[in-house]
Image (tube, rainbow, N blue to C red):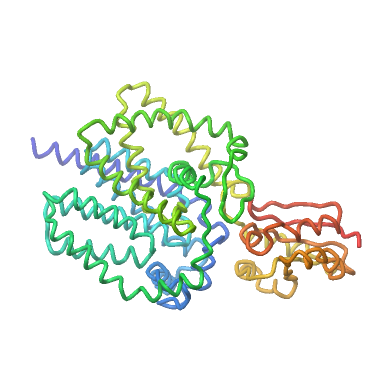
Amino acid sequence: MSDVIPARMKKRVDFILLAIVAAALALRLPHLGYSFYGDEMFSLLRDSGTFLTHSEDRFRPVFFSLLYLWRQLGFHGEIGLRLLPLIFGLAQIPLAYHIGRRLGGAPLARAFAVLMAVSPMLIEFSQELRMYSMVAFLALLQVWIVLHLRERSSLGRWIAFVAVTWIGVYTHLHYWLFVAGLALTLFRERRTIPFWQSAAALGASVLLYLPNLPNLLYFSQVRGAEYVVHLPSAIPKLLAAVTLGFNYFALSDQSSGRVVGVGDVLHNLPLVALAAVPAALLVWGFIRLHHRPLSPTAWLGHELFTIPAFLALIASAVTGQYWLQPKYIIFVAPFAVLFLAASYLALNMRWVKRAVVILGAAVLVVAYAHFLDPQHYGRRENWRGMSTYVRAHLTPESTLLILDGAHPLFAYYWPQVADVWQPVHVPREEALAGKFPDDLRARLAGKRDVFYLWHDVRRNTADPADLLLRSLDRLGQNREVVQFNPRFKLYRWTLTL
């Protein structure tokens, strides 16, 4: 009889895990076929055309190589290609479950897996054709290997550890910050994991990365100065992203540093208040979690969330670049979720736990509803919808202006668009900027109306003062705005030339 009961319990646990994964899949399927957006353009049009990309991104080639092989298997289009990050996103959940079980038993396993399944940030990255879902998966896989090494050290497990480290740092440079935190975990576990073996594995990982240094130096020369950070809002944005996601708050267009200020907080005050109550209760659980002696869960959370985030903060302060951007340190997100799960379990009053569940669920419902409404929330530009709209409304008597520079996703969804758009170079020099409206008036002579594709990413680099928009406001009337995303709009004016 004693042998039968554990078998039944195991089946029940497997069913719980299966149900959590099924729920995670259900949350990740809607909008899987949404328009390609943002940096997905690099994955789609540039870096997955060959097995090893030739662009400056060749310092992190692994995801692009996998995507190239994925395409060779016949997967194409938004849904077909995004199945790859979706698989990594779903695979995170069983790993989280088993990590939680080894750290804190079944309660932590269930709480960790459920929160991973409903994490707004991880849901979004499960649909993004970039490496971030894969990086979060690798971080969990590496911790899972370390927990097995704690039980029994073997050559095969160390080879797996080094292999995952190698894949991680060749998938994203910032994974080294995670490896630094993991080194502290190995040092803390030196009584169960031989120190010399840990040192040898980390040393081998460093040696395996040395051949990639020329590619890294090339990237830093080509694009290394593009990533500007606004330090005062960087940590609050990171905490909001890993807990609430990118879509919970409504944000206006932002500068290149993605500055979030007091005005944004006041604009979102009801949403801030809704999230503040469960957050405060979880902070109390977080404090209780740190009663001495510290549990392995608390140690691991600090080693793999707090330490990498702190190192990214230092790197941002020293270099002036955005090491703290949430997607760049996506590997900390699962361990922020681990902290949430452990803090919830540390609460000692039933009514407090119920309040956290009810209010937390309300917050997540809002975040998910906003995720499904990219026209008004988040960061996903609808290039397909915008292309369809322009094709339907552009006439021989109208013109389409865009800021000078590449717009590859526009051409992807409308291959003939280069025949109809007019790129505009906005001068930065004060003397030339003063003449710009007159030059623009002459350029638009003979046209009845004008469209302007406004994209904050391009605006931030090519026209940070919005001179083109302000000039068109002076030249035209009856301004109309079609918003495809808060950061992606199509303006239209009737000309009065």
Judged left or right of residue 275, residue 8 is: left
Residue 214 on image: x %, y %: 38, 76
Judged left or right of residue 416, residue 110 is: left
The quadrant where residue 280 appears: top left
Residue 225 on image: x %, y %: 51, 65
Judged left or right of residue 460, residue 99 is: left
Front residue of 141/475: it is 475
Judged left or right of residue 191, residue 162 is: right
Q: Residue at x 31, y 66 (%)?
A: 167
How many numbered circles are shown? 0
Question: On screen, 132 above or below 280?
Answer: below
Residue 488 on image: x %, y %: 65, 55
Question: On screen, 171 above or below 479?
Answer: below
Q: Where's the C terminus, which quadrant?
A: bottom right
Front residue of 407/66: it is 407
The quadrant where residue 290 appears: top left
Q: Residue at x 12, y 60 (%)?
A: 154
Residue 209 on image: x %, y %: 30, 70
Q: Residue at x 42, y 43 (%)?
A: 118
Q: Residue at x 35, y 74 (%)?
A: 212
Front residue of 427/481: it is 427
Q: Where's the N terminus, which quadrant?
A: top left
